[in-house]
Amino acid sequence: MQRVVARGYRTAVGQFGHGGRSSVSGLKVALFGGTGFLGRYVANEFGKIGSTAYVGTRGSEMEARHLKPMFDLGNLAIYYYDGRDEDSIRDIIRGADLVVNLVGKTFETKHVVPTDENGKLKLFGGSRINWGFDDVHVTLAERIARIAKEEGAENLIHVSALTADAESSSAWCRSKGLGEDAVRAQFPTATIVRPATLFGYEDWFLNWYAWLGERFAIPLLEDGSQLVQPVHVADVAKVIADIAQNPEDLAGQTVELAGPADYTRAELAEFVKDVTRRNYRIAPLPAPVFTAVASMVESLPTPYLMKDFAERWSVDEVLEPKDGVLTFDDFEVEPATVEKIAFQFLHRYRKGGHFVYAQGYH
């Protein structure tokens, strides 16, 4: 298949060097969600080619300091922003050629007590939700896209999800689908990237299985026969970087990315159990029981189980080829398998570490 992105020598005005972190690509990128799981890998890809990155963080400088070694001196600027403050968002985007939105929520964050929309205590009629799925995946995504257009950004890459569906019964999947519509309404030439569930060293997927298994049990919805096609986070980052280097040809396109193999959730639970060599208990739960347990757990500040999982997991998450939708093949990226990568970070859950099982001269 013909390659979508063709790399060549840097000949454009403002570019120099032989490539690498100390070269200058001439690309200025506003990166939202750059301090997160996928974000750190995307930031590293931009740093590799000598790009200038303006990274927004909603926390302190400490939350972004791990990005500094990825860029040559002067090529990384860290900005504090509030997703509800348009001026702070505008400060990040101003002057950027490309805007990349990686912001996403695994669970809705909450206050300790109910508040009103201004954050003031409201015991009756208030809500504990601070940032909900719609707030992040729809409202904030639309706001970033609109400001990017107003500030004259040439291109926008918006990261959604493979299961994005505006009609989904899952609040998470529905918000992802509505977010795509909102972004395209504000920035019609945006490139939408839909990755499957990401796995990697810092993931909230295979680590989630191991963490819960270590403390309680690994929950499954029914018999865990639902399919998932996990994709390595570094492979997705490579594609995003490729899109950034050839945005005109990919403007308005949709890219769907999934790993080379699919697994049932029960198979993945057994895989984690095998790699960690721990006797984790696997708990298949009927949907009503799963939902009841999740209802209690999701009220915690960091819920490791949510009612919405029952809706998200009720459908298979696998890549189905579609006309006009790009995949890894179009970028000549061969995605890594779970079996090849996962041991690198799951062995830390073994009792005594992986050296206990090493054989050789001692």
Image (cartoon, rainbow, N blue to C red):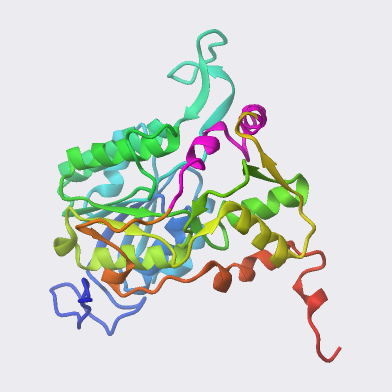
**Left-right relation of 225 to 230:** right
Of the pair 289 and 88, the residue shown nearer to us: 289
Q: Residue at x 62, y 38 (%)?
A: 305
Of the pair 210 and 240, the residue shown nearer to us: 210
Q: Residue at x 23, y 68 (%)?
A: 245
Furthest toward the bottom, the residue is 361
Q: Residue at x 60, y 33 (%)?
A: 287
Residue 87 visible, this angle = no
Q: Residue 25 in the image: x percent, y percent? A: 25, 72
Q: Residue 108 in the image: x percent, y percent? A: 51, 33
The quadrant where residue 176 appears: top left
Of the pair 274 and 298, the residue shown nearer to us: 274
**Left-right relation of 272 to 158:** right
Q: Residue at x 61, y 58 (%)?
A: 267
**Left-right relation of 161 to 255:** right
**Left-right relation of 281 to 248:** right
Q: Quadrant of the C terminus?
A: bottom right
Q: Residue 350 in the image: x percent, y percent? A: 76, 65
Q: Is residue 146 above or below residue 295?
A: below
Furthest toward the right, the residue is 362
Q: Is residue 263 above or below residue 181?
A: below
Q: Residue 20 in the image: x percent, y percent? A: 34, 79
Residue 307 highlighted magenta (yes or no): yes
Q: Quadrant of the N terminus?
A: bottom left
Residue 337 highlighted magenta (yes or no): no
Magenta residues span 289-317
The quadrant where residue 47 appears: bottom left
Residue 95 visible, this angle = yes
Q: Is residue 112 above or below residue 178?
A: above
Of the pair 277 and 283, the residue shown nearer to us: 283
